[in-house]
Amino acid sequence: MEIRAGASPSESSGKLAGILAMAATAFLWSIAGLVIKKIDWNPIAIAGTRSLIASLVILLYLRRPKFNFSFPQVAASVSLALTMMLFVTANKTTTAANAILLQYLAPVLTAFIGAKLLREKPRAEHFAAFPFVALGMLLMFSGELSGGRLLGNIIAVASAFTFSFYFIFMRMQKDGSPLESNLLAHWMTAAVCLLISLFLPAPTASRGSLVAIMVLGVIQIGIPAILFAFAIKKVSAVSATLVAVIEPVFNPVWVFLAIGESPGPNAVWGGAIIILAVTAASVASSRRKPAN
């Protein structure tokens, strides 16, 4: 067995920066559920308007986007657009807990699909973290899980596949500029959702809903797109998806801060297990020397 030396200080700091950027991305993603409840619109209108605003944030940051329409650039954008639309649909056709739990099959899928497409083999720390993450997720949502609707559960599993492919195709652009894929994805989502919205009842543009949709577009998904594009250049696809699992951990925190509803002991223990597993795997990965 080949023994690899640890990563150099610069490599370790680069990986750590990527992991922290991914953690910040997951943290900001997690406010979606709470903010969406402030908007009395249909989900399609919310998704389309959110993506339109996010695309403006990304465009402002990029200034001059570079579109080469390579396979990874287009595939990543299609994967993200499908993930956003599938997840919204899953939430409407099965329980929210089922939708989240099934979508976060993504780290395991990324590990095996990424090994084939990226030649980034999952490490021992990833395999060690997976069962603990699964245990934490089951604990967090144990009181909310149900059979759900079969169609909704299938859609949620489909979103797990598209979510994992998003990470993989973004990682393929680690030597380029993956942020353009996010820009294309939000344009696609905005175009499809806003077109569908023309055939639905018009949303009510109250002050509260307009503020909330701006928060969603700018803070919940626009800024995270920039952070994610930075993170995926620094860490492997499986490491990034593993860190992303902390997103649902923050949901009870936001509920507590917003309405004072304390999370139950299962949610606390489940969240703690996920955080510890992800942190341990991330620290181990950051100390590794990149494979040749």
Image (tube, grey):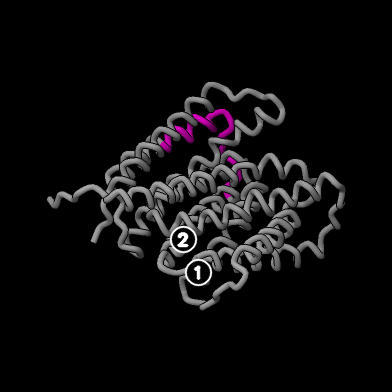
Question: What residue is drawn where x is 42% and y is 59%?
Answer: 233
> Is 142 a magenta residue?
yes
Q: Which residue is mark 2?
A: 165
Amino acid identity at mark 2: Phe
Image location (x, y in percent) of residue 109: 41, 53
Considering the image in quadrants, where does the C terminus appear?
A: bottom left
Assign a secondary structure to mark 2: helix
> Is 96 a magenta residue?
no
Residues under labels 2 and 1: Cα distance? Answer: 8 Å
- Assess whether mark 1 and mark 2 are in contact (beta carbons under 8 angstroms): yes
Task: From the viewer's side, name the closer residue of 6 and 83.
Answer: 6
Question: What residue is drawn where x is 33% and y is 48%?
Answer: 12
Residues shaded magenta = 133-150
Check disc 2: other Cα within 10 Å, few if <14, some if 14-19, many if 20+: many
Assign a secondary structure to mark 1: helix
Q: Is residue 232 left or right of residue 185?
A: left
Image location (x, y in percent) of residue 82: 58, 61
Image position of 47 with respect to 283: above or below: below
Q: Any mark on residue 201, and which?
A: none
Q: Is residue 103 left or right of residue 88?
A: left
Image location (x, y in percent) of residue 265: 53, 21
- The quadrant in which residue 63 appears is bottom right
Amino acid identity at mark 1: Ala
Q: Is residue 209 left or right of residue 177?
A: right
Q: Any mark on residue 75, and which?
A: 1
Please, which residue is most extreme toward the left here? 1
**First along the sequence among labels 2 and 1:** 1
